[in-house]
Image (spheres, rainbow, N blue to C red):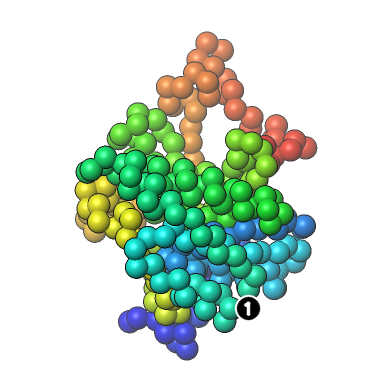
Amino acid sequence: MEATTTSNNYRKLEKTLRYNVWNAIDDFKMIEDGDKVMVCLSGGKDSYTMLEILMHFEKYADIDFKIVAVNLDQKQPGFPEDVLPKYLSEKNVDFEIIERDTYSIVKDKTPEGKSTCSLCSRLRRGTLYEKAEELGCNKIALGHHREDIIETFFLNLFFSGKMEAMPAKYRTDDEKFVVIRPLAYCKEEDIAKYSRAQQHPIIPCNLCGSQPNLQRQVIKGMLNTWEEKYPNRKAIIYNALRNVSHSHLLDPKLYDFVNLQSLVLSDQELQGENIEKFF
């Protein structure tokens, strides 16, 4: 049964999402006293959900932090410019809309039939970093969820020859900002149900939505097939990403196969260290 905002199913769903976000924040020390967090809002289900949950914690959590919602209007044809300002004004949240025609650059620079995602992402990232510095934000929140992390792991495994997913928290190369993913523990299915119940004004991405053969879509289909045939596969795969045995892989940068000892600090060795630098 589809959840509505007045149903018991919705209240359980909202509680689950808040619980998972709070656990991610706590496990990775994503948000601390004095932080100003730029919440990147795309107009999709994930970023709407992230914003509303962070707004709840800004109001009720025992952490003193501030948020500001930021959307990048990339000047895609038909982009409804009034939707997000109206929504954000009704939510009574501080927000900024950046207008930057990255759409034309991406379309001009990307060869026909090639994916636009890489260039689009780089342009978006640079623009958002500039705005974060202007607004005095030290944290940047992105709306990637559990399935995004799993899919990225398999993309890197199958197409890049490396075992790497999306970090829940990392510092930018220039060391100016810490990027966080508060939805890291949240299921995409739960986010979709929540967003439908909230009747979020979804804005589709016309830039990449017409690319049906993206490798990520292939991976998503593969994972969904596994999930249907072997229920709970995604949860098991996700747990594996949090349960790594360095000695049973083949990377000498992580494990000293000469002296048979790990080259990565243990939990005990991390005590008293500045843990943030390891994320």
* Residue 194 picture quarter: bottom left
Q: Quadrant of residue 39?
A: bottom right
User: Which residue is located at x 45 percent, y 67 percent?
Assistant: 43
Residue 218 visible in the shown view: no
Residue 218 position within the rendered picture, expressed as x and y whole percent measured from the top left? 24, 48
Relative placement, left or right, of 177 versus 204 is right
Can the viewer see residue 142 in this picture?
yes
**Residue at 77 percent of width and 37 percent of height:** 272
Residue 224, image x, y percentages:
26, 55
Q: From what the image shows, is residue 279 above or below residue 134?
A: above
Q: Is residue 155 left or right of residue 263?
A: left
Residue located 42% across and 76% down the image? 201
Residue that mark 1 sits on = 92
Quick check: 94 above or below 176? below
The answer to whether 142 appears left or right of 271 in the picture is left
In which quadrant is the C terminus drawn? Answer: top right
Q: Residue furthest top?
A: 258
Is 87 located above or below residue 67 in the figure?
Answer: below
